[in-house]
Image (tube, helix red, strand yellow):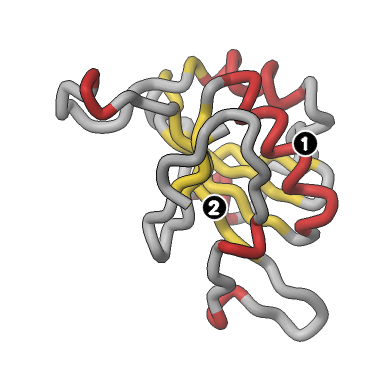
Amino acid sequence: MPGLRSGEAVSLSALPVSPANDCAMAKSRQVVILKTVNPADDDGDGLPSMGSIDEIQAILARFNTAHDNAVAGRAADMSLLRLHGPGLVAEFSTSSPEVKQIMVTMTDDDFAFPVLARACREQKWTLMDPESGQRLRF
């Protein structure tokens, strides 16, 4: 999967499903969204910024992904913003003004993957499987 070129067919089934992420009703899968970086341009200073918290919320809102206005729970305690979208839940830290990565739990691959693929293609983001390190570039 590394080295996919724009326009090539991508299948999420190539990414492994973790038994730890399985639930009784349906399988969920986690991926991380990162800003795509050319290895030649990587300065080694960690992950590049994807944008401000407000910019990321605005981008994801175009893909029918927004918060549910619930303040209580784990997200409030850990400075995480949780956004709900079609077949997915996206979480990212609010402890810094810049978003460096987004953790996405896909609850329904059939709905979530086309949305994620389109967002990644438009924003030049990369999906990464956190267990294997495999990246899908669009």
Tag of residue 119: none
Q: What's the distance in space between the residues labelled 1 and 2, CA to CA?
A: 24 Å
Residue 119: x and y, percent?
67, 28
| Residue in front for this viewpoint, 121 or 58 | 121
Q: Which residue is mark 1?
A: 69
Q: Residue furthest bottom?
A: 24
Residue 80: x and y, percent?
52, 41
* Crowding at mark 1 (Cα within 10 Å: few <14, some 14-19, many 20+): few
Residue ID at (41%, 65%): 131
Going by the numbered disc 1, the residue's amino acid type is: Asn
The quadrant in which residue 9 appears is: top right
Q: Is residue 80 left or right of residue 89?
A: left
Q: Between disc 1 and disc 2, whose residue precedes?
A: 2
Residue ID at (63%, 43%): 90
Q: Secondary structure at mark 2?
A: strand
Name the image quarter holding the C terminus.
Answer: top right
Residue 63: x and y, percent?
79, 28
Going by the numbered disc 2, the residue's amino acid type is: Val
The quadrant in which residue 108 appears is: bottom right
Residue ID at (45%, 35%): 34
**Relative to 58, is 12 above or below?**
below
**Relative to 26, is 79 above or below?**
above
The quadrant in which residue 98 appears is: top left
Tag of residue 31: 2
Q: Residue furthest left?
A: 44
